[in-house]
Image (cartoon, rainbow, N blue to C red):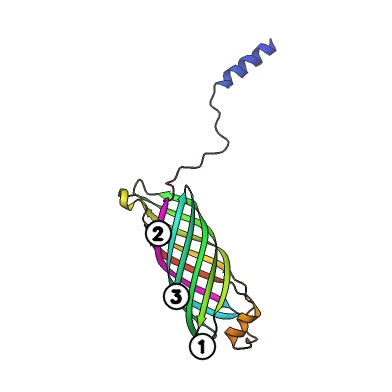
Amino acid sequence: MRPLVLLCLIAGTAGAEVPPILAEEPAVQPLPKISASVGVMGTAGKLARLDLTGWAPNVELARGAGRWQYFGEVGFGFVKLGPKGDRVSGHQVRGGAGVRWLARSFELGDKGAIEMHLEAFAGYSRFDLEGRAHIARPDLGAGVGYGVRSFVGKRLRNSGIRITVRVFFAPTDRRDEEIACRGSCPMTAGNSNAGLMAMFGGYL
């Protein structure tokens, strides 16, 4: 009798809907397959252990695949190097490439979305300072950003604005220090060549 009752219980629960253990990830609008961005990038950090600040127009081309986006960027701008009262002006040319992941998307109906993304990148810069030889260095870093994307109409479907904050790290060798410091860096200069990049721009 007991085996019969057990079989009836199993048969009764077999057809019942079992709730999923993990909820499925909500669908989001995929990132645009092709997009171009124009913006401004500000930099604050160290170059050869000296304070570095600058800004540059920045152009980006990107290819999207679902939540992922692969991008290349280039910028040309102006920098200032050294302590207050003894700053040297110059120019910076930088190229880079990276990957971006759409981490969160809060959709505003079918009109658009507020989004958060994470990204990792690598780049290469050349600095031309007044009266000195050029300095070239690679950089590596990661960032987090927020943006607003429009879904209105076919032409505007891929348009939006985005702001990103990045942390980067860049090595410096002895030659760079000799060029930047005219032979010797002050003892008060830091040993880190880390810094921040802040980027704001629109894309289509």
- Residue shown at the point (61%, 18%) measured from the top left: 9
Q: Amino acid at mark 1?
A: Gly
Is residue 72 on the magenta stretch?
no
Q: What residue would you read off at disc 3?
A: 77
- Residue shown at the point (45%, 53%) measured from the top left: 63
Locate residue 130, reporting x and y percent.
Answer: 49, 86
Locate residue 194, reporting x and y percent.
Answer: 59, 72
Q: Magenta residues?
A: 24-45
CA gap between label 3 and label 1 equals 18 Å
Q: What residue would you read off at disc 1?
A: 131
**Which of these two is toward me, 57 or 197?**
57
Q: Amino acid at mark 2?
A: Ala
- Residue shown at the point (46%, 72%) measured from the top left: 42
Quarter containing the C terminus: bottom left
Horizontal side of 35 relative to 153 (left or right) equals right
Is residue 38 on the magenta stretch?
yes
Mark sitting on residue 36: 2
Locate residue 2, reporting x and y percent.
Answer: 69, 13
Along the polypeptide, which appears first: circle 3 or circle 1? 3
CA gap between label 2 and label 1 equals 36 Å
